[in-house]
Image: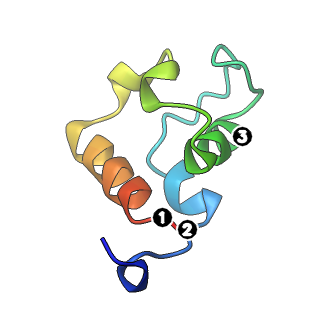
Amino acid sequence: MSLENKEIISVTDLYEYLPNINCGKCGVGTCLAFAQKLIEGDFKLNMCVHASQISEENKKEIENILSNRI
């Protein structure tokens, strides 16, 4: 994908699709921090122990958001 089709995404764009439980079991204290790690490429979605609670629709949105990041 060319750079002009990429976009800068905010943490809150991604955060709204996460479980928002803030359990910290992923290694960071909040789902907002987890979203930042996803954006930075340091974490994968499956590192969230509650990822199974994310709907397939939301998982696809997360994938779309991450695939279009700069």
Q: Nearer the viewer, residue 17 or 42?
A: 42
Q: Which residue is mark 2?
A: 9
- Residue at 41% of width from left, 24% of height from top? 51
- Earlier in the chain: of badge 1 and badge 3, it is 3
Point out residue 69 in the picture as x, y percentages from the top left corner. Answer: 48, 64
Would you say the residues marked 1 and 3 are in contact, meaning their CB atoms lie under 8 Å apart? no
Amino acid beneath label 1: Arg
Q: Amino acid at mark 3?
A: Ala
Q: Nearer the viewer, residue 19 or 26?
A: 26
Crowdedness of circle 1 by 10 Å Cα count: few (<14), some, many (20+)? some
Tell me the CA gap for discs 1 and 2: 6 Å
Q: Do the numbered discs 1 and 2 sit on residues whose CB atoms are within 8 Å? A: yes
Q: Which residue is mark 1?
A: 69
Element assignment for label 1 = loop
Give the label on residue 33, or none.
3
Q: Position of residue 2 (x, y in %)?
A: 34, 77
Residue positioned 43% across, 79% down in the render: 3
Q: CA distance from mark 2 to mark 3?
A: 14 Å
Q: Residue furthest bottom?
A: 4
Q: Secondary structure at mark 2?
A: loop
Q: Is residue 67 left or right of residue 29?
A: left
Q: Is residue 58 left or right of residue 56?
A: right
Determine whether, in the image, residue 21 is placed left or right of residue 47: right
Q: Quadrant of residue 10?
A: bottom right
Amino acid marked by disc 2 = Ile
Q: How is the image coloured?
A: rainbow
Q: Secondary structure at mark 3?
A: helix
Q: Earlier in the sequence, mark 2 or mark 3?
A: 2
> In x, y percent, where is residue 40?
63, 48
Quadrant of the image occupied by residue 43:
top right
Q: Nearer the viewer, mark 1 or mark 2?
A: 1
Q: Is residue 5 above or below residue 45?
A: below
